[in-house]
Image (cartoon, rainbow, N blue to C red):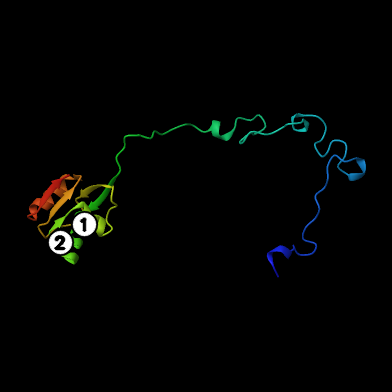
Amino acid sequence: MNLNNIRPAAGSTHSTKRIGRGQGSGKGGTAGKGHNGQQARAGYSQKIGFEGGQMPLQRRLPKFGFNNINRKEYRGINIDTLQILADTKSITEITQEVLVENGLAKKNEIVKIMGRGELKSGVSVSAHKFTKSAEEAISKAGGKAITL
């Protein structure tokens, strides 16, 4: 068996009904379009979402929302995650490169350090932003919070 001799199963396909080819065909005269009306005319095509003159759904629903084009999306990293990183890899200085290497952030992401958890080791953390609680926790543990 080759691709050039594959056939559909016997009886699974039918030849298409040829419309508008005389009364004997069963689809002559109006060619299955009925009598007159918009859909019987040549060149008729319906707009997407057209509901027969009824107000379409996309126009019935209210408009809402706003997308700020100047929005900055931060990658939030908690200090308990930094503690785990400091324990397992024995790191004293956490920078953007260290976060990228360990899969906590992507190369071009803006990082914000959040205050969940507890920091025991005094590590120096470099990030774009810090929450107040995170900054306090880092300085309390004997580390430094460096804003990039």
- Circle 1 crowding by C-alpha within 10 Å: few under 14, some 14–19, many from 20: some
Q: In the image, 57: left or right of 98?
A: right
Q: Quadrant of residue 11?
A: bottom right
Q: Secondary structure at mark 2?
A: loop
Q: Residue 2 at x, y = what percent?
A: 69, 67
At x 21%, y 49%, the residue is: 114
Tell me if residue 113 comes above or below residue 82 in the rendering: above
Kind of residue sitting beneath label 1: Val
- Circle 2 crowding by C-alpha within 10 Å: few under 14, some 14–19, many from 20: some
Q: Residue 85 at x, y = what percent?
A: 20, 61
Kind of residue sitting beneath label 2: Ile
Q: Quadrant of residue 101?
A: bottom left
At x 92%, y 44%, the residue is: 24
Determine the CA span between mark 1 and mark 2: 9 Å
Instruction: List the single residue furthest toward the right.
Output: 24
Tell me if residue 57 comes above or below residue 98 in the rendering: above
* Residue on which the image places disc 1: 98
Question: Which circle marks residue 91 in the picture?
Answer: 2
Tell me if residue 1 comes above or below residue 57 in the rendering: below
